[in-house]
Image: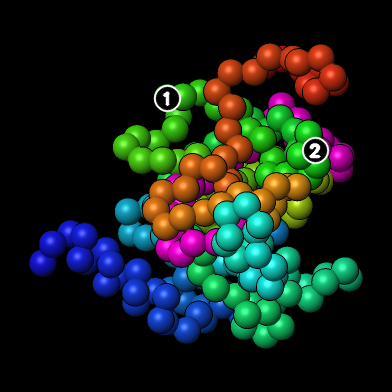
Amino acid sequence: MKYSTVIALFIFTVLMTPISYANDSHASPYDFVFGNHIDTHQETMLKDNGQLFGFLYIIFTGDVDENSGLPIARHPRGLSDDHDEQCGITADCKIGWLINGKIGHAKFLYHSGVNGNDHPVWLLNRVDIPQPGSYTHFHWISRTATELRAADVPDACDKQKASQLETEEPSAVNVQCPGWMLQIKAIRGFAFEHGGEVIPVRPGIDNATHLNLLTNYKAVEGITATRGGSH
């Protein structure tokens, strides 16, 4: 059987399989948790080779992106005082991306920016980006993550939300945090709404929607000059 046929059959199976994700819990074998807000829209498993595999979820808003013609979707936000979007309970979640993850660490820089509150931005050396692949997203872990490094997570990195890395003391600005380098592959077409932008997504490797890495950093007047610290 050709490789392309195998991939097509796998994606068809994923699309047709009911999700187990419910109530912000993660059913075995997809029972890995980062210990922070990403757990409201991810299901992954820690494989024997020490890598992650799983899914990133979306919910469709019912709107259509006028530029691309694609249906608009965003991540479910879980349960809080402001919203109730629990996959399988109060939200009809769909798999938007497949995830492959490799262990890593990165220095936190900032969260708020010209796009408002977007994915947190991280600094790392190019040599620390896994190859081969398209690992363009870093996500940190907290002390409640289901992995051995959790116990050694610095206080500054032990935060539930990206905004807290920046605003809650101790601040994580310029702190090295443990986490995972993620490669994501879209399995359907949609327009992803996040961080004040709507980004068209097509099936295949996605290096745009979750890109949050810097490999060189310099203060830019009016944007980064207030971040301070050595880089």
Q: Nearer the viewer, residue 56 or 68?
A: 68
Q: Find numbered disc 2 in the image and state the secondary structure of the residue it sits on.
A: strand
Numbered marks: total: 2
Q: Does 214 sit above or below residue 81?
A: above
Q: Does 24 sit above or below residue 47?
A: below
Which of the labelled discs sits on residue 112, or is there none? 2
Residue 209 placement, left or right of 129: right
Q: Name which residue type carries label 2.
A: Ser
Q: Find numbered disc 1 in the image and state the secondary structure of the residue it sits on.
A: helix
Which of the labelled discs sits on residue 127, or is there none? 1
Q: Residue at x 78, y 21 (%)?
A: 224
Q: Nearer the viewer, residue 8 or 122?
A: 8
Q: Magenta residues?
A: 166-192
Q: Nearer the viewer, residue 227 or 65?
A: 65
Residue 190 placement, left or right of 24: left
Tell me which corner region of the image, top left, top right, bottom left or bottom right, holds residue 214. top right
Quadrant where the N terminus sits is bottom left
Q: Residues within 10 Å of mark 1 (few under 14, many from 20)?
A: few
Q: Residue at x 76, y 39 (%)?
A: 115
Quadrant where the C terminus sits is top right
Asked if marks 2 and 1 touch (Cβ < 8 Å), the reply is no
The answer for how far apart the CA atoms under marks 2 and 1 are is 27 Å
**The magenta stretch spans residue 215:** no
Q: Position of residue 120 (x, y in %)?
A: 69, 40
Q: Residue at x 65, y 64 (%)?
A: 64
Q: Is residue 79 visible?
A: yes
